Image (spheres, coloured by chain):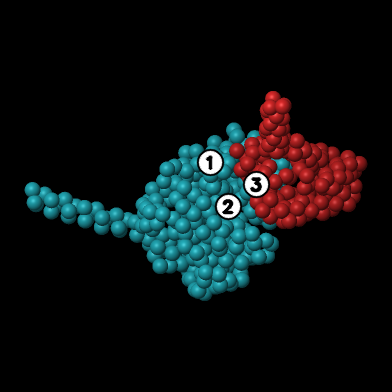
Chain colours: A red, B cyan
């Protein structure tokens, strides 16, 4: 009996330890949220290179990239940003604690990205001239959020 | 012995007097400014390029509210925290009662109308290159801005940096009215130099500073630790910033890097300003950076 109890306590301790580890690591959430920004960057690059004349304008490719941006904007954010996954608490992120202190504003800024993505979606197939202004709009949305909530690179 | 002591004391007093003299704050000679016509529209461009609102607007002010220069933003440094003052045209809380000459003294020499030194968190070490006509136009534009009654807050600076006279020594050591890049042999390079070295005061953050906070001009735009203590401000020298000129110009317009990451931190404000300037100005900055030795 006593032996069983010891085992049980040891198991419980182990289980708690594992849970605590999983909670402070957040590697899956970091990969997910950083991955979505990568997808954004790649697709913005397709449109931005056309806007700058670095690559030839292609309405179909621009539309596909813009549709992808809108798709990213529809990913629900909350599950990827658990409390405690900020740059003061863990390594591997530039997310500042004020994301959680001013979460409504943070999510509103994410919403602004969605608005800008829809503007790109509407303009993408309409010719290269239309890309510059909407890229400016999405650039503004990116900066507005990064200005407040992302720590500088090291 | 006693006589020696007396002489020593006399010497010290003389030294102190000399130090007092050289660390004094003398206003600018405003005679070159007198009688000039002013153009507030041109002044607006100077205002944008110089980034006045980026530091002097209220914290978190957006869009048109950025034209209200109420102050209040905090700037951390190794010497303490500086709090941007109200420089709106309010006659009491701001600088509305100043003369053009007093404004020029502040911008180009870091000297207040009361004859005090401003701390070099105010980038007069860069603005000292500003053309006289641009100062006149800037002041004319200033008169069109909204006044705000928010009182300025005192800086949070400890001893010995709270002795304003020590800034006089700093000025002697570091203020330099020669260009860092001596040759700018096309109009584009000249414009780029004026924007980078003077108005946009890029060197203030991108150039490393020595122990007393002076810019190390030998490592001009060579990158520096962020004065907030978090992260690094990148080098803009050609060996480090390998972007194409068109990519630099595009970054200054949209905030997108060549791999479509985007700007953050104080650079966001800088890009908001550059986006409002003509494309030729962004290209001029790119040309200047690419031509750095």
The answer to whether residue A127 is visible is: no
- Residue under circle 3? A96
Please report, as a chain letter, where disc 3 is located: A
- Residue nearest the observer in this picture, B235 or B143: B235
Marks 3 and 1, how far apart at CA: 21 Å
What residue appears at the point 82 percent right and 47 percent down from the top-left corner?
A: A76
Disc 1 marks which residue?
Answer: B224
Which element carries disc 3, helix, strand or loop? loop
Secondary structure of residue under mark 1: strand
A22 left or right, relative to A122 = left
Can you give x and y, in whole percent of width and height, for residue A122 in the image? 88, 52
Q: Mark 2 sits on what residue?
A: B200
Q: Residues within 10 Å of mark 3 (few under 14, many from 20)?
A: some
Please check whether the numbered discs 3 and 1 fall on a single chain: no
> In the rendered structure, the residue with mark 2 lies on which chain?
B
Mark 1, other Cα within 10 Å: few <14 / some 14–19 / many ≥20: some
Between circles 1 and 2, the one closer to the viewer is 1
Instruction: Say few, some or many: other residues with alpha carbon within 10 Å of mark 2 (under 14 / 14 to 19 / 20 or more).
Output: many
Labels 3 and 1 touching (C-beta < 8 A): no
Q: Percent position (x, y) of residue A71?
A: 86, 45
**Number of numbered discs:** 3
Mark sitting earlier along the chain (1/2):
2
CA–CA distance in space, label 2 to label 3: 28 Å
Seen as rendered, the residue at the extreme top is A3
């Amino acid at each position: 009996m006593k032996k069983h109890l010891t085992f049980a306590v040891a198991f419980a301790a182990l289980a708690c330890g594992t849970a605590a580890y999983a909670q402070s690591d957040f590697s899956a959430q970091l990969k997910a949220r950083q991955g979505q920004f990568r997808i954004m960057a790649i697709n913005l690059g397709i449109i931005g290179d056309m806007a700058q004349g670095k690559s030839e304008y292609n309405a179909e490719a621009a539309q596909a990239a813009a549709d992808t941006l809108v798709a990213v904007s529809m990913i629900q954010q909350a599950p990827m940003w658990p409390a405690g996954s900020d740059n003061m608490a863990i390594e591997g992120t530039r997310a500042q604690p004020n994301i959680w202190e001013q979460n409504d504003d943070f999510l509103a800024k994410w919403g602004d990205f969605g608005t800008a993505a829809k503007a790109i979606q509407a303009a993408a197939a309409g010719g290269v001239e239309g890309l510059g202004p909407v890229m400016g709009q999405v650039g503004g949305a990116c900066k507005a959020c990064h200005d407040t909530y992302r720590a500088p690179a090291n | 012995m006693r006589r020696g002591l007396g002489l020593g004391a006399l010497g010290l007093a003389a030294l102190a007097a000399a130090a007092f003299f050289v660390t004094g704050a003398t206003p600018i000679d405003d005679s070159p400014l007198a009688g000039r016509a002013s153009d507030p529209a041109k002044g607006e461009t100077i205002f944008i390029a110089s980034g006045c609102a980026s530091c002097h607007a209220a914290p978190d002010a957006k869009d048109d509210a950025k034209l209200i220069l109420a102050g209040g933003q905090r700037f951390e440094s190794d010497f303490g925290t500086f709090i941007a003052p109200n420089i709106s045209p309010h006659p009491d809380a701001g600088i509305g009662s100043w003369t053009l000459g007093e404004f020029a003294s502040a911008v180009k020499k870091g000297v207040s109308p009361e004859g005090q030194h401003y701390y070099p968190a105010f980038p007069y070490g860069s603005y000292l290159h500003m053309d006289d006509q641009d100062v006149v136009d800037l002041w004319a534009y200033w008169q069109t801005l909204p006044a705000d009654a928010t009182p300025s807050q005192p800086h949070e600076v400890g001893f010995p940096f709270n002795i304003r006279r020590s800034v006089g020594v700093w000025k002697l050591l570091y203020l330099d009215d020669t260009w860092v890049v001596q040759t700018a042999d096309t109009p584009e390079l000249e414009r780029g130099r004026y924007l980078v070295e003077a108005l946009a005061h890029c060197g203030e953050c991108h150039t490393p500073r020595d122990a007393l906070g002076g810019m190390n001009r030998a490592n001009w735009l060579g990158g520096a630790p962020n004065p907030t203590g978090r992260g690094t401000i990148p080098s803009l020298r050609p060996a480090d910033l390998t972007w194409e000129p068109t990519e630099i110009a595009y970054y200054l317009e949209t905030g997108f890097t060549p791999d479509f990451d985007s700007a953050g931190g104080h650079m966001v404000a800088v890009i908001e300003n550059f986006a409002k300037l003509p494309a030729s100005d962004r290209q001029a900055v790119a040309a200047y950076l690419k031509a750095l030795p």
